[in-house]
Image (cartoon, rainbow, N blue to C red):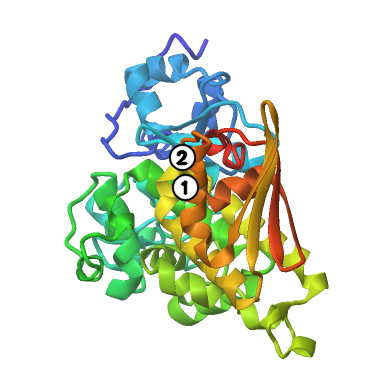
Amino acid sequence: MYITKKLLRRPRPFKDESLSGYIIRLAQSNYYPSPSWIFKMSSLKKRGIYANLFYSHEDDLQKLSLLSEVEEHILWSMAWISPRQSNSTFMNTVKIFGDFVPIQSISKKRVKLCPICLRSAPYCRSVWELSFIKHCPLHNCLLIDSCPQCSKKIVDSRPGVTICKCGFDWRNYEPETVSEKQVSLSKFVYNLCRIADFDSEIINSYKNPNPVLKLNFQDFAYLLCSIVKFGNLYQIKKRFSNRAKSLFHSQDSESCFNFAFFVALNWRSEFQKLVLSHKNCLDSKYKGSFIKKHNSQYYVNLFRDIFRCFPKSSCGFITNVIEDYFWNFLVKTSIKNVEISGIKQPGFHFFNSPVNEGKSFLKKLAVDLELEELTVASLFATSQVEIYNRTIFFKMTYLMDVSNCIFTGCY
Ligand SMILES: [Zn+2]
Ligand SMILES: [Zn+2]
């Protein structure tokens, strides 16, 4: 039986090593031709994509612990742990560095590595598996995800940590160097995850109160994934990808996180650039001051979709900007009134206000109705929204405390 035997060579894992990378290293140092041997001996399912993703309810690391003489809790700490996955991608999370973050935080398609880091110590850094990390901030270079010799994608089922199936040793490759601008996200993430302590000119150039720079890793991961989701809305997508291309030469969804970070840091000005101009929705018949009737539902849906991208309360500074834009948009499109209606026992109520006082109206109404909070985002989440007679209507079933049900279930 395999399991009673320990492996002949049992290298200790490094603190920042990924479990999937460690399994490759165990196979290599014991002269197995591929890591699938170790998977077989430890009765673990072979991984495809999401190589370092292990399921707490399904994977048992006990045999691997016996084989390698590494304590089980250490092995678990090297893995990205996921609870049971649901069918909705946006609901799925993964535990990274102790925090549950959206599953989109890890790279789906690619195994990435830094040839220069491998030269200094040949093991796989778990941080390379984050989708936010495209560059090595230690060496200001691009991580490689395909072999420079055979051009094939780098995969986990390979003969060695640094060696491709074609025999090329990636340590012999000189990776492309990148600019300070391109590496700033990686630097920021390395700092957040306490992997290194970088001083970044670009990040420092943002004034201290920039709320993005105060987020913890979990909130930051949610923010970046939210912005990417926002950039994927069909009404936003084209502008988002054009701007990402021109600023960061980003081609695909996995590499747009650099731009998402830039958008987050410059949210007020970038949001203005990325949403459609209000002028497009005005009716020329009325000298361009009224919202076109057939367009009103389009804009209602657009704002609802945008708010839905930012369900986390830590994204409050983002939704504030959208709300300001929203009120401004209504004023410019000659919508005069806002009306909120719904049942609050013992009867049905409605409240209205001129649109140009909309913001203070919501604040006052929250106090009057004894609600914790009343925001445009929460109204969009809980109301039927309609525009007619130069009025925007938020028709709620019940005038209840909506602060807790802001688009729950979006992640
Ligand atoms: Zn490196
Ligand atoms: Zn190769």
Q: Quadrant of ligand 1?
A: bottom left
Which numbered disc covers residue 154? Answer: none
Q: Report the number of numbered marks.
A: 2
Q: CA distance from mark 2 to mark 1?
A: 5 Å
Mark 2 lies on a secondary structure that is helix
Q: Amino acid at mark 2?
A: Val
Q: Position of residue 85 (x, y in %)?
A: 62, 31
- Against 103, residue 75 (above or below) is above
Q: Is residue 19 left or right of residue 273?
A: left
Residue at 50%, 20% in the rendered image: 42
Mark 2, ligand 1, within 8 Å: the answer is no
Residue 126 can be seen, yes or no:
no
Q: Position of residue 179 (x, y in %)?
A: 31, 76
Residue at 51%, 21% in the rendered image: 56
Q: CB atoms at circles 2 and 1 under 8 Å apart?
A: yes
- Choose between 75 and 181: the one closer to the eye: 181
Q: Which residue is mark 2?
A: 367
Q: Position of residue 16 (x, y in %)?
A: 29, 40
Q: Amino acid at mark 1?
A: Lys
Q: Is residue 146 left or right of residue 119?
A: right
- Choose between 170 and 341: the one closer to the eye: 341
Mark 1 lies on a secondary structure that is helix
- Choose between 108 and 211: the one closer to the eye: 211
Q: Is residue 410 left or right of residue 316?
A: right
- Against 94, residue 177 (above or below) is below
- Against 52, residue 229 (above or below) is below
Instruction: Sort mark 2 into few (<14), some (14-19) or many (20+) by Cα contacts within 10 Å.
Output: few
Q: Position of residue 78 (x, y in %)?
A: 37, 32
Q: Which residue is mark 1?
A: 364
